Image (cartoon, rainbow, N blue to C red):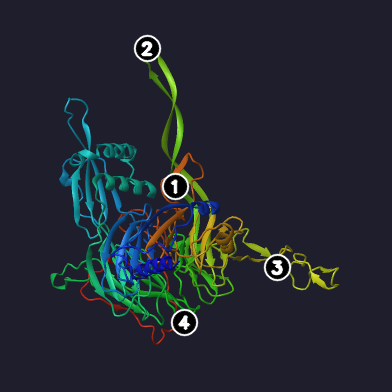
């Protein structure tokens, strides 16, 4: 007995003094969620992986998703940034972004896909475009056939990076190993050569096929935060392009356009740096952003919500309680709202063009719907000159979680297994037929009603129409009149008690029908994770999952049910992402384990080629008004002209813009 105790104490001592090797993850205490438990709730693992952490105090500190939903970023307390493919979990690169200990924010990425230009034919290569920004050019030419037959078709490519550099000038002959990919690309392009206006999804597929075939994608940058330093990294390699020290720590996610990178600071300033290099040699930056400091604007509170830049304006909110919309170039405040409570969470967006609308959550418990350009379409004049009051939806308590906006006719690509009859000739020279299974690519349209899903700090989830601010169908309930319940006597005690559900209902005086009030679903959650076509996924403070039906507004599974009865333990996954792009769920532990969850395919014979977007793809992005790059002899549609309110004077600490020095204006465009 004494010998056994001695051996046991020796083993415990050895474990106590054991030190993990450098770069080894200590994840043995966190188990991956069980497949059976995930299946019981209607989910499956899409992928899982781990990022290497140094032994000691290094932990995973922040998780963020790129604006286009293609990249997942994980930042550690030692200021190491890992970039992963959001759909496969493959590690693309890692980068060191400065000293340890700095606060992290969501990484900014320019979300628009590269432009595509198709040239059906040309005489010489000199006729190809020699200038462009973030552009893929595909040109078609012919050459004589070696056997004297019909001329052969040849594809030619030019790729311009985001800074205008001609990065690649090549032909398909330089890629003999990609013969099959080039043939597939020719098949896709054959009916499209004369079509200048390709649908957005089709342009994305063509650009993806080109970059896959030639092994190069137009280079753009990602922008990461470490404390008061802003880093620009090459999107493809993670190589540091430049770094900029700011006057205070960043407090908001980074927003990026092709010309500007914008971030909010803890001192209440919104600061922008130009990505367009000046033509003046004496003003060129040797370090930092190419165009240097562009402008900043001071508010009366820290900026924690993500700025929303559009074609002409940028919208941003302050903890001081005001929403601002400013012209980008030249910078000038178009309007600011009156104080509407502390604006802490990031805003949502809905619509496009002049009908673009900002969905603004406030700590005063209200959700606001502001028109980005203030005015609605006047049917009498045909112009956007009718002032519209923003709608207000009360939730009952403060809102510190980002709302999600989803809906519309979403187009997805799926692989379907089909059987086809095939005729072949046998060895006896007779014709036979047989069924052959083939996988084909099909387009599917998923119709979803547009809705805003907002979660307040009491864990109540609401669904709101983004146009009117009214509850969505099945997300409202009649209003009972207190004290009108039918009473029942308890035979054992003789006491009277009201019978639930028997109260009289309040009536709408206008219609005589029962009046309705918004129905909040109690989820106990503090964050919305993702939306699928039929469900809403949420996470509680302790890491448990809650699931709500989008159609009925009923709780499918609460946190206690998913953890207790269904056995799904996600409590070790303390880091999460609010996915406002597609339906994937991303979770991570502080010790470096990352996992992606998704809903399984509806049928074994159907496989979706990618995630399902939240919203329908639009040719006109949010806030887009017109295309200045094309000349049209016709009269353009009327453009709203925001007017700055004159009733309100700037506060003492609500300063005007400061301008940069020596930077080339991003794109000198004004709203006319």
**Mark 4 or mark 1, which has the lower sequence index?**
1
- Which residue in the rendered view is the most extreme toward the top? 428
User: Where does the image place residue 58, in percent across and percent down from the top left?
Assistant: 33, 70
- Say which residue appears at 34% left-offset and 81% top-offset: 656
As measured in the structure, the alpha-carbon distance from the residue carrying label 3 to the one carrying label 4 is 39 Å
Marker disc for residue 412: 1
1 or 2: mark nearer the eye: 2
Q: Is residue 413 left or right of residue 474?
A: left
Viewer can see residue 582: no
Query: Dot 1, how many residues are within 10 Å of its Cα: few (below 14), some (14-19), or many (20+)?
Result: some
Q: Is residue 83 left or right of residue 574?
A: left
Q: Residues within 10 Å of mark 2 (few under 14, many from 20)?
A: few
The reply to whether dot 4 and dot 1 touch (C-beta < 8 Å) is no
**Label 2 residue SS:** loop
Is residue 570 something that shows in the picture?
yes
Label 1 with label 3: CB-CB less than 8 Å: no
Whichever of labels 1 and 3 marks the residue nearer the N terminus, that label is 1
Q: CA distance from mark 4 to mark 1?
A: 48 Å
Count of numbered marks: 4
Q: Which mark is residue 479?
A: 3
SS at badge 4:
loop
């Amino acid at each position: 007995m004494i010998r056994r105790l001695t051996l046991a104490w020796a083993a415990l001592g050895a474990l106590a003094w054991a030190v993990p090797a450098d770069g080894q993850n200590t994840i043995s205490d966190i188990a991956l969620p069980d497949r059976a438990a995930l299946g019981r709730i209607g989910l499956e693992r899409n992928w899982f992986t781990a990022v290497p952490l140094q032994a000691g105090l290094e932990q995973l500190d922040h998780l963020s998703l790129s604006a286009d939903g293609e990249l997942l970023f994980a930042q550690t307390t030692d200021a190491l940034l890992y970039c992963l493919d959001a759909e496969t979990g493959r590690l693309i690169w890692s980068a060191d972004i400065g000293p340890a200990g700095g606060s992290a924010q969501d990484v900014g990425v320019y979300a628009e896909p590269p432009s595509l230009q198709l040239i059906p034919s040309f005489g010489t290569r000199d006729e190809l475009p020699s200038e462009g920004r973030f552009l893929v050019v595909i040109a078609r030419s012919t050459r004589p056939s070696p056997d004297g037959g019909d001329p052969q078709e040849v594809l030619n490519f030019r790729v311009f990076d985001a800074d205008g550099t001609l990065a690649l000038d090549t032909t398909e002959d330089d890629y003999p190993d990609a013969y099959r990919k080039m043939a597939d690309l020719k098949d896709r392009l054959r009916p499209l050569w004369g079509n200048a206006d390709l649908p957005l999804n089709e342009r994305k597929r063509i650009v993806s096929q080109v970059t896959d075939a030639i092994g190069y994608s137009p280079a753009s940058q990602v922008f990461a935060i470490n404390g008061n330093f802003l880093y620009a990294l090459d999107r493809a390699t993670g190589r540091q392009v430049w770094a900029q020290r700011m006057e205070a720590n960043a407090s908001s996610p980074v927003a990026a356009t092709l010309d500007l990178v914008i971030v909010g600071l803890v001192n209440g300033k919104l600061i922008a740096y130009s990505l367009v290099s000046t033509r003046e040699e004496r003003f060129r930056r040797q370090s930092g952003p190419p165009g240097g400091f562009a402008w900043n604007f001071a508010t009366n509170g820290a900026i924690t919500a993500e700025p929303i830049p559009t074609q002409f304006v940028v919208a941003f909110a302050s903890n001081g309680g005001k929403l601002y919309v400013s012209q980008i170039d030249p910078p000038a405040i178009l309007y600011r709202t009156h104080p509407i409570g502390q604006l802490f969470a990031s805003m949502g967006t809905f619509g496009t063009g002049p009908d673009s609308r900002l969905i603004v959550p406030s700590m005063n418990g209200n959700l606001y719907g502001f028109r980005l350009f203030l005015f609605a379409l006047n049917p009498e004049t045909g112009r956007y000159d009718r002032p519209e009051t923003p709608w207000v939806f009360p939730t009952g308590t403060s809102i510190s979680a980002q709302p999600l906006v989803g809906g519309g006719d979403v187009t997805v690509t799926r692989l379907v297994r089909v059987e086809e009859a095939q005729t072949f000739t046998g060895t006896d020279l007779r014709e036979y037929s047989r069924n052959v299974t083939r996988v084909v690519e099909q387009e599917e349209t998923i119709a979803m009603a547009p809705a805003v899903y907002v979660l307040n700090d009491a864990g109540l989830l609401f669904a709101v129409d983004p146009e009117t601010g009214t509850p969505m169908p099945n997300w409202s309930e009649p209003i009972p009149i207190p004290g009108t319940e039918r009473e029942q006597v308890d035979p054992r005690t003789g006491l009277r008690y009201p019978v639930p559900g028997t109260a009289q209902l309040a009536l709408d005086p206008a219609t005589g029908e029962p009046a309705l009030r918004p129905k909040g679903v109690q989820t106990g959650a503090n964050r919305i994770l993702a939306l699928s076509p039929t469900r809403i996924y949420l996470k509680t403070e302790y890491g448990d999952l809650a699931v709500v039906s989008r159609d009925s507004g009923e709780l499918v599974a609460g946190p206690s049910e998913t953890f207790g009865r269904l056995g799904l333990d996600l409590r070790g996954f303390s880091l999460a992402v609010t996915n406002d792009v597609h339906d994937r769920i991303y979770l991570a532990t502080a010790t470096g384990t990352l996992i992606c969850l998704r809903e399984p395919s509806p049928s074994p014979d159907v496989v979706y080629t990618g995630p399902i977007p939240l919203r329908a793809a639009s040719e006109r992005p949010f806030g887009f008004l017109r295309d200045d790059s094309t000349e049209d002899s016709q009269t353009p549609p009327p453009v709203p002209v925001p007017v700055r309110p004159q009733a309100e004077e700037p506060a003492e600490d609500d300063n005007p813009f400061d301008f940069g020095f020596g930077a080339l204006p991003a794109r000198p465009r004004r709203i006319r």
